[in-house]
Image (cartoon, rainbow, N blue to C red):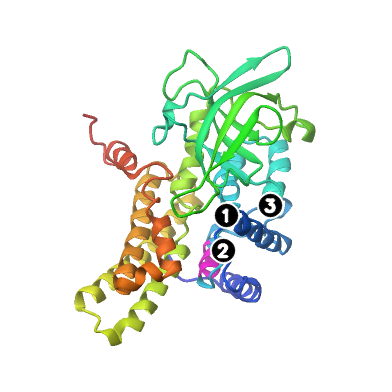
Amino acid sequence: MDLTWSESEEAFRTEARSWLESNVPTPALPSGDTKEGFALHLDWEYRLAADQWSVVSWPKAFGGRDASLWEWLIFEEEYYRVGGPQRVTQNGIFLLAPTIFEFGTAAQQDYYLPRMSSAVDLWCQGWSEPNAGSDLAGVRSKATRDEAAGGWRLSGQKTWTTRGAFCNYLFGLFRTDPESERHKGMTYFMVPLEGDGVTVRGFGRLDGDEGFAEVFFDDLFIPDDDGTAETMVRGGILGEVNQGWGVAMATTSSERGLTLRSPGRFQATATRLVDLARERVGDGLSQQMADAVADAWIDAEAYSLFTLSDVTGVVEGVSMGARSSYNKIFWSELDVRLHEVALDLLGAEAELDGPWMKGYQFALSGPIYAGTNEIQRNIVAERVLGLPRK
C-alpha cells in the first residue's frame, strides 16, 4: 500500500481545505438532532451542495465531483480538521445512496440521488422495531400486495429512528411473505413520511435532543414503480421483492464499514485530545494519563491505516463483507476511549465542558447503533474466524 499522495490528490486537498476554511460556520452549530440545529445544518448542506462538496465521490450528474475514494478520504480529513458540522444528510448519502448505486434502477438513481445530494429529500433509517432492535431478522412490519390498486400496503411500526422527526423519507425492511421467517421474505422499501397512512411521533433523548422518532404505518399505499417521477415520489422497492435481506446487508456494510465513520472524524478528535493534554501538563500530567492519551492517538492512526487498506481492496474490487463488523467494533469503541480519556483529563470540570461531555454521551451509543457490538462479535467469530456456533 502506497501511503504517499499524488500531485492531483494534494491539489484536491488544497482546494478542499481552502473552501472549508472559508465556509465552515463559526461558531459551531448546535446539535443537528434538535429542531433549531437541524434547520441550521440544512443551510450548511445547501451550501455544500451548491459548490459540489456534498458528495465528492459521486458522478457529477448526481451532484458530485467524480472524485476517487482516496480523495473522499482526503475531503473527510479536511472536513473534520476544521470542525465541519455533523452531516444531517448522512443516512441518505452514506447509507442509502451506496445501496441505490448497487441495486437501484437507472430511473431510481436519476431521481433519488440528485435530490439526496442537494438535501431536497432527507432520509432516515427504519431498521429497529419494538421487538426487533439488534435482531434485524425479527422485523414484523409488513407490506401486503394490493393487485387491484397496483402496489403495496404497509403496516407496522419503526422506532429509534434517528432524525425521523425531521426527515421526509424512510428506508427499511418490510415482510412481504407472511409465511416467511427470519431473513427470508422481506423487501427493502423506500417510503415517504408525509401523507395518509403514516404517523411520525418524535420523542426526546436523555441528553435533551429531540430528533428521534417512532413511525407508525397504517395501510400506507406504495404504488408500483413505473420509472416515472410521479410514482417514485411516493416511494418504491429497492431490489427484488422478498430479496430485501441481501439489499439491507449492503446498507449495513456501508454503515459499519467505510462511509459512515471515516478516519478523519477520529483523527480530529484525537488531535483535540492531544491539545487538551498539552494544556494540562502544567497541572502535573501523570505518566499513566500521558500513556492513555498516546494510546488513544495511536488507535486513531491505526484506524486510518486500516481504512486505507480497505479502500485499496474496494478499489481492486474486493468486498468488505464481514470485515465491516470488526471495523465497526473498532471505531465505536475507539470513540468511547477518546472521550473517556478526555473526561479523565478534565476531572471535575468534565461536567461543565459541553463539547467533550456531549461527545461522550453520543459515543456511548456507538456500540449499540449499526448493530450492537455483541452481535458484531458473533459475526466476526462465525464469518471471519470460522468458529462454530454453540
Query: Which tag, 2 or 3, sits closer to the chain's start?
Result: 2
Magenta residues?
73-80
Mark positioned earlier in the residue sequence (3 or 1) = 1
In the image: residue 139, left or right of residue 36: left
Q: What is the spatial separation of the Cα atoms under label 3 and label 1, in whole angstroms? A: 17 Å
- For label 3, the crowd category at 10 Å Cα-Cα, with few meaning under 14, some 14 to 19 and many 20 or more, is many
Q: Nearer the viewer, residue 98 or 10?
A: 98
Q: Residue at position x 54%, y 50% from top?
A: 210
Kind of residue sitting beneath label 3: Ala
Q: Is residue 136 left or right of residue 20?
A: left
Dot 2 amino acid type: Pro
Across and down, in percent, residue 365 comes to 40, 50
Identify the residue under disc 2: 30
Q: Is residue 66 visible?
A: no
Residue drawn where x is 58% and y is 73% of the image: 27
- Inter-mark Cα distance, 1 to 2: 8 Å
The image quarter in which residue 65 lies: bottom right
Q: From this viewpoint, is residue 338 visible?
A: yes
Quarter placement of the C terminus: top left
The x and y percentages for residue 4 are 46, 71
Is label 1 in contact with label 2 (beta carbons under 8 Å)?
yes
Residue 34 shows which numbered tag? 1
Circle 3 — which element? loop
Which of labels 3 and 1 is toward the front? 1
Residue ID for mark 3? 119
174 relative to 273, above or below? above
Within 10 angstroms of label 1, few (less than 14), some, or many (20 or more) residues? Answer: some
Q: Relative to 174, does residue 200 appear above or below in the rendering?
A: below
Q: What residue is rendered at 53% in x and 45% in y?
A: 212
